[in-house]
Amino acid sequence: MEAAEYWALGGNDDKALKAAAIGFNIILPESMTTKVDPDFYVMPENELTVSVFLALGTSWRRDSLSGVWQGLDYPSVKTVMWSQGVKKSDCKAVFNGLQVMEEAAINVLNSKLKK
């Protein structure tokens, strides 16, 4: 499993969490496991990016003929970041995080089309 896909799939097992952390060069605290919150855990420093990503739920581009998910509608990203109160100094980091989440989501969404 690719590190970013852990989050796109809902992240619910400790082994996958550790693999995802290694993929992002993150050192997890010993106390952090999915048992803390089995549904979904977001590290505090990622909360703003996840909030923006979730607010973009209706801002995806999809090919109307094939149904293939193409990615986020980038003009909408700026509007959503503004509406979520993202500071100008945080925009680059949030956008970079969105692109990681977007890539993982596209892989998962499009893999379901092939079945």
Image (spheres, helix red, strand yellow):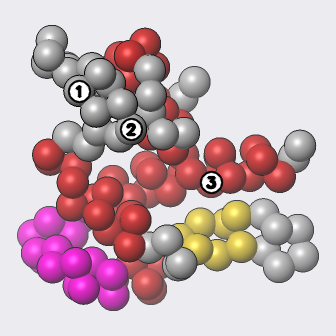
Residue marked by disc 3 = 106
In the rendered view, tell whether residue 49 sits above or below residue 12: below
- Along the line of sight, the residue nearer the viewer: 115 or 37: 37
Q: Which residue is mark 1?
A: 36
Query: Within 10 angstroms of label 1, few (less than 14), some, or many (20 or more) residues?
Result: few
Identify the image quadrant of the N terminus. Answer: top right
Relative placement, left or right, of 31 versus 26 is: left
- Residue shown at 62%/54% (left/top)? 106
Q: Secondary structure at mark 1?
A: loop
Residue at screen point 82% across, 68% down: 67
Residue 59, visible in the rendered structure: yes
Tag 3: residue type?
Ile
Quarter assignment of residue 39: top left
Q: Indicate yes or no whether the magenta region holds residue 88.
A: yes
Give the residue drawn at x 43%, y 84%: 76
Q: Which residue corresponds to the image point at 88% horizontal and 68% vertical from the top-left?
A: 66
**Which mark identifies residue 39?**
2
Q: Give the dominant element type of the magenta stretch: helix, strand or loop.
A: helix
Instruction: Answer with mark 3 or mark 1, whichever residue precedes in sequence.
Output: 1
Q: Relative to 6, is 81 on the left or the right?
A: left
The kind of residue on which mark 1 rests is Val
Query: Relative to 50, is 103 on the left or the right?
Result: right
- Residue 23 screen position, x and y as percent: 39, 25
Q: Is residue 23 visible?
A: no
Verify CB contact (< 8 Å) between mark 3 and mark 2.
no
- Residue 7 in the magenta stretch? The answer is no
Q: Residues within 10 Å of mark 2 (few under 14, many from 20)?
A: few
CA–CA distance in space, label 1 to label 2: 9 Å
| Residue span colored magenta | 79-94
